[in-house]
Image (tube, rainbow, N blue to C red):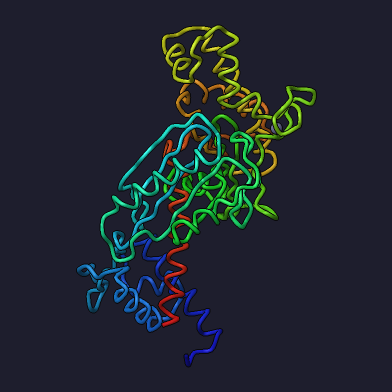
């Protein structure tokens, strides 16, 4: 190889940048790519030719000219490969096949009761195998497998602790890599949800975004200055365990009075059981509230109020532009949101409605899987740059 190491690294980065620009802004011309990226036209032209040869992009007609020759339009070849992106919940697994633009092509779901690791893994493998088999033929096949998990994930992709699954030290990334020999991403589900909403959902415009994933437990994903904030070892966002009642109920984590004991779906179901609801499912309470039952309306009001308390604390720490509420609790959003907003408005210092937008997840149950898809796609683009240049 005649290039120096430095040239090699710069070229790799430039190529990933061009690809990312086409992903975000297509249809786009070579000249516009040069303008957006700040690369010179010759560099863009040569990288674009390589990407066309690799079948990752293609030319498609011409755009209107602003004087001179009409520019040729470039498009992403989004069906050149697919991702398998999974949201591993506490009771459900949602798995999707997406193309390279994050469009969902196929979707599978399964429910599980037992948290036995081998049983859950076998359900997970089954869904991944099915999607792999049913994926349409393509140039690159499955380019990445990614899993969002409800727990603390190290930067090496090991699940250190998933309290609501009762798992400790599960080397999930290693297990999946050994089995599939495809690049694997393992990420906290709330981090993935935050990224999904930023890329494809409610937070497209926001650079300071908080995603509160409220389900059996609560996790929080933080996007600060446009980037996912992971903390020193990837443990940030365990805000479901911030103390909101100092002598409160005892939590699985060992502390007392954790936010998730008062504001999660679990907290809601406990209240429902105390109030005499028999099956005590979230759907049952929502239906009762829809019918105007005071008991159900009170439960939802109180849960919403507690969600608002935690979110107010988070607003005070991070001063976000956008707060997105996601995961299974969304089934009750219309009953919860007024109470959440009321509490935030009452308790937030210097509250200004125009400064902080609180909204339900635009992607509904798909925030996490689409965030995972975005991670898979970015990784593939980065690595494709590597392989090509090495040849
Ligand atoms: Zn706790």
Residue found farthest to the bottom: 2
Quarter of image, res 50: bottom left
- Ligand 1 position by quadrant: top right
Front-lying residue, 323 or 174: 174
Where is residue 296? Give x, y as percent: 51, 11
Front-lying residue, 159 or 74: 159
Look at the picture and state if 85 lies above or below 254.
Answer: below
Residue at x 20%, y 68% (from the top left corner): 61
Residue at x 54%, y 31% (from the top left corner): 215
Tell me if I can see residue 205 in this picture.
no
Front-lying residue, 280 or 329: 280
Judged left or right of residue 158, residue 256 is right
Look at the picture and state if 97 lies above or below 240.
Answer: below
Judged left or right of residue 319, residue 128 is left
Quarter of image, res 314: top right
Badge count: 0
Residue found farthest to the right: 247
The quadrant in which the C terminus is found is bottom left
Judged left or right of residue 127, residue 8 is right
Tell me if I can see residue 22 in this picture.
yes
Front-lying residue, 216 or 351: 216
Residue found farthest to the front: 118
Residue at x 35%, y 49% (from the top left corner): 97
Look at the picture and state if 329 lies above or below 175.
Answer: above
Where is residue 387? Give x, y as percent: 43, 75
Where is residue 242? Give x, y as percent: 71, 34
Look at the picture and state if 275 lies above or below 312.
Answer: above
């Amino acid at each position: 190889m005649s290039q120096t190491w430095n040239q090699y690294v710069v070229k790799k980065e430039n190529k990933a940048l061009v690809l990312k620009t086409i992903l975000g802004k297509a249809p786009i011309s070579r000249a516009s790519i040069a303008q957006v990226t700040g690369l010179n036209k010759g560099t863009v032209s040569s990288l674009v030719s390589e990407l066309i040869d690799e079948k990752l992009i293609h030319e498609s007609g011409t755009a209107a000219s602003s004087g001179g020759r009409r520019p040729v339009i470039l498009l992403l070849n989004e069906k050149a490969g697919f991702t398998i992106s999974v949201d591993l919940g506490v009771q459900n697994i949602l798995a999707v096949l997406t193309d390279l633009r994050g469009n969902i092509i196929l979707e599978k779901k399964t429910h599980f009761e037992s948290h036995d690791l081998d049983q859950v893994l076998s359900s997970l493998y089954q869904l991944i195998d099915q999607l792999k088999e049913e994926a349409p033929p393509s140039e690159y096949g499955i380019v990445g497998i990614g899993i969002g998990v409800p727990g603390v994930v190290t930067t090496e992709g090991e699940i250190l602790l998933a309290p609501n699954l009762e798992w400790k030290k599960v080397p999930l990334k290693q297990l999946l890599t050994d089995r599939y020999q495809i690049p694997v991403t393992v990420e906290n589900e709330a981090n993935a949800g935050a990224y999904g909403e930023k890329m494809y959902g409610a937070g497209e415009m926001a650079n300071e975004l908080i995603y509160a994933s409220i389900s059996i437990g609560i996790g929080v994903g933080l996007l600060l200055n446009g980037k996912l904030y992971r903390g020193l070892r990837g443990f940030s966002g365990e805000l479901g365990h911030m103390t909101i009642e100092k002598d409160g109920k005892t939590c699985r984590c060992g502390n007392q009075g954790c936010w998730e004991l008062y504001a999660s779906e679990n907290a809601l179901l406990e209240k429902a059981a105390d109030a005499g609801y028999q099956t005590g499912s979230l759907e049952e309470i929502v239906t009762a509230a829809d019918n105007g039952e005071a008991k159900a309306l009170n439960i939802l009001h109180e849960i919403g109020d507690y969600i608002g308390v935690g979110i107010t604390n988070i607003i005070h720490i991070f001063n976000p532009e956008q707060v997105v509420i996601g995961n299974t609790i969304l089934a009750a959003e219309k009953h919860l949101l007024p109470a959440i907003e009321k509490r935030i408005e009452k308790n937030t210092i210097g509250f200004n409605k125009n400064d902080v937008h609180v909204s339900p997840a635009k992607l509904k149950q798909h925030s996490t899987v689409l965030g995972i898809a975005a991670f898979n796609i970015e990784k593939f683009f980065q690595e494709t740059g590597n392989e090509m240049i090495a040849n």
